[in-house]
Image (spheres, rainbow, N blue to C red):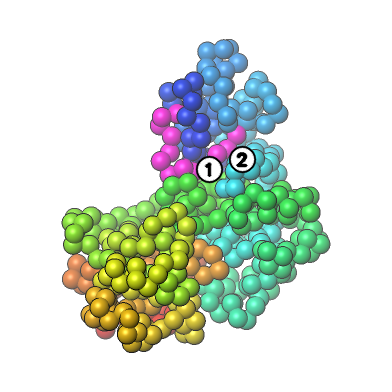
Amino acid sequence: MKTSRIAVLMVLLTSSTLLTAASAAAEDHPLKIFGNANMDEVIDEEDIEYVRGIIEGTNEVTELADANYDGQIDEDDITQIELIIDGDENELTLIDMAGRTITVPQPVERIVSTFPEETRLIVEIGGADMLVGVSSYLSDETYAPNFLMLIAYPHLKELPGIGSYRDPNFEQIVSLHPDVIISGNSGPEKADIIQEKTGIPTVAISAKFDYEGEGGAFEAYRVTGAVIGREDEAEELITFIKDEFDKVTKITSGIPEYEKVKVYYLCYDLTQPYSAYAPIEIAGAINVARIGPESVVTVSEEQIIKWNPDVILIHSTSKSHSMGTIEDILSDPKLQSINAVKDGRVYYSKGGYVGGNPATSVAEVLYMSKLFYPDKFEDMDVESEGNRILERFYGVDGLYTYMQENCDLYKWS
């Protein structure tokens, strides 16, 4: 439950006219809420004092100082900031992950989510019971067995389906009377269309395959938390994730660059690898395909051979292995010179599934760290630790064991 409105905020403006406090902005590029007048990391009494300074002419105007978003900065903004601090605001204006300025009624009690990626975020910070409509993916028997959140929250499968993200059923969405629609972020146009067709505030959110930085999973949790009144839960989950990463990086941070394992993680097929997939680097390895901002890139077979990865991972969503098999890689005559093939270091790994999933990626950091550096993590029980991690996200034990079997992940005896 929401106990106070504490929002971590990112600096958007770099003009020299901005206040000195802006230099202390969050390095995680978290969400931007109107009311964060001094552009630091929290909405608190200092923002009230900063707005007073604007009114008196002693402080510069900042983008987020107009707390009630009415086009002027006055005592009404101080009142709005006080309400935000107390968690009593009637509406909240923020800039979503598509760069759109959206005003959302508060408190939010009914949510429609148009894509499983965003549904996971809502569920993971305690908003499962607020969902009244979800993507039809969740009731599709082709996809449903691979969603861990359906094991923890089976009732989600029975909620009304609103179609796909690309082709939502607007009439169905309106009939569910949501307070807000949580939409994917494929650019502002899609969310704008959904909002225009339904007349319901639509917030664009996306959990990419990285955690830090603008557009990362931490920002996604914070935006979601702010919108649905689960800020505290979002911050607690982010702290948990960082603590889990620290346990690994304390061991891997001392590995010299020239000794780091080189990894190639094929996503859709051999020549389409993950370019952005944070667990690889967090586990202390080098993602040889980290060549651009896109999540997935296309490369040539010649480039893969030139990179000569020590480990090859294959994106696995189920035992069908539609993205390729270990045997395919090991028997490919063109790949026989690659270290990973010569040493038999080719494995399945979970990766994303119908969007990103920061929860399973945390467990993957431990899985990968032991795959990459078995001597350094010899005593780690990956299955036990993975179950503990996923239970923190979903409240159910045994989820890693299920995922391990379902995706044919490597098991240590």
Quarter of the rendering containing residue 292: bottom left
Question: Which secondary structure lies at badge 2?
Answer: strand
Q: Does the residue at mark 1 contact the one at mark 2 (Cβ under 8 Å)?
A: yes
**Residue tagged by mark 2?**
94
State the residue at coordinates (79%, 54%). 197
What number is the disc on residue 31?
1
Circle 1 — which element? loop
286 lies left or right of 52: left
User: Magenta stretch: residue 30 in it?
Assistant: yes
Which residue is painted at 70% across and 28% down in the image? 70
Q: Label 1 to label 2, Cα distance in Å?
A: 8 Å
Quadrant assignment for the C terminus: bottom left
The structure residue drawn at horizontal position 66% and vertical position 76%, both measured from the top left corner, is 139
Q: With respect to residue 211, does 5 lie above or below?
A: above
Rendered residue at 48%/35% (across/down): 11
Q: Residues within 10 Å of mark 2 (few under 14, many from 20)?
A: many
Residue 45 visible in this rendered orientation of the protein: no
Q: Amino acid at mark 1?
A: Leu
Name above or below for residue 173 compared with residue 179. Answer: below
Decide which of 63, 307 is in the foreground and name it. Answer: 307
Q: Report the magenta residues as a range.
A: 22-34
Q: Examine the rendered structure and indicate whether residue 60 appears above or below residue 178.
A: above
Q: Residue 111's x, y, as percent?
A: 68, 57
Of the image marks 1 and 2, the number of the one nearer the N terminus: 1
Q: Residues within 10 Å of mark 1 (few under 14, many from 20)?
A: many
> Can residue 289 be seen in this snapshot?
yes
Q: Residue 222 in the image: state x and y as whole percent.
A: 52, 48
Task: List x then y, in percent, for residue 157.
Answer: 65, 73
